[in-house]
Image (spheres, rainbow, N blue to C red):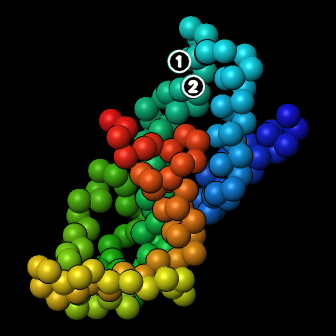
Amino acid sequence: MLETGVRQVRVAMAMVFGRRLNVRAVERLVADALLTLEEFGSLGDDVDELADGPFADSDERRDLQDRALRRTVRRLAERSPFYRERLAGIDLDDTTAATVTGIPVSRKADLVERPADFLCGTPYLATQTTGTTGRPVQIWLSRYEMWSFRWCSPSSSRAGCPSATSP
């Protein structure tokens, strides 16, 4: 039980501070939750009130989303040559979900023409599309993305992940 509490705090702090989630900790939390349901049965009528928690307030939720968006665009501008150019002249500290439409959209042609300029770090895996609709597109994934995709892929047998037949 103490281990579950520690994992919950670690995952929560990662989300609050915009750090990478420890995929194994999340897997264990899902397993812990399933064991709790198995032992104690279904949730009570008051679960909706508890589940909404601090994000029930739409202003707080919007503020959290805007801060996460600003963190993401700053990281892109700092680490990716493509997005550094794309975001030049945009006040990144003023970016919100309402103003994000002012940022030009990245097109497939951009990825085909300048694949390496999208990188934000050292790639862990490189692959490419078949090119059936034109030039093949190179795709590079980080180690974190590989863990994330493995964990929540539709073919994953991990508890809590959607299956290919889930709605």
Q: Is residue 109 left or right of residue 47?
A: left
In this view, 9 is above or below 145: above
Instruction: Name the residue located 17 percent from the left edge and 88 percent from the top edge.
Output: 135
Residue 14, percent across and down? 66, 55
Q: Are marks 1 and 2 in contact (CB under 8 Å)?
A: yes
Label placed on residue 48: 1
Label placed on residue 51: 2
Residue ranking furthest to the right: 2
In this view, 58 is above or below 155: above
Q: Is residue 85 left or right of residue 65?
A: left
Residue 127, percent across and down? 38, 83
Residue 86, percent across and down? 29, 80
Q: Quadrant of the N terminus?
A: top right
Task: Name the image quarter holding residue 76.
Answer: bottom left
* Numbered circles on residues, count: 2
Instruction: Name the residue located 39 percent from the left edge and 61 percent from the top edge.
Output: 94
Q: Is residue 150 left or right of residue 95?
A: right
- Is label 2 in a helix, a strand or a loop? helix
Residue ranking furthest to the left: 133
Q: Is residue 25 left or right of residue 81?
A: right
Instruction: Name the residue located 50 percent from the left edge and 52 percent from the top edge.
Output: 156
Instruction: Name the residue located 35 percent from the left edge and 40 percent from the top edge.
Output: 165
Q: Nearer the viewer, residue 26 or 13?
A: 26
Q: Is residue 121 visible?
A: no
Q: Is residue 106 visible?
A: yes
Q: Nearer the viewer, residue 16 or 34?
A: 34
Residue ranking furthest to the top: 45
Q: Label 1 sits on what residue type? A: Asp
Task: Name the image quarter holding residue 90.
Answer: bottom left
Q: Label 2 sits on what residue type? A: Ala
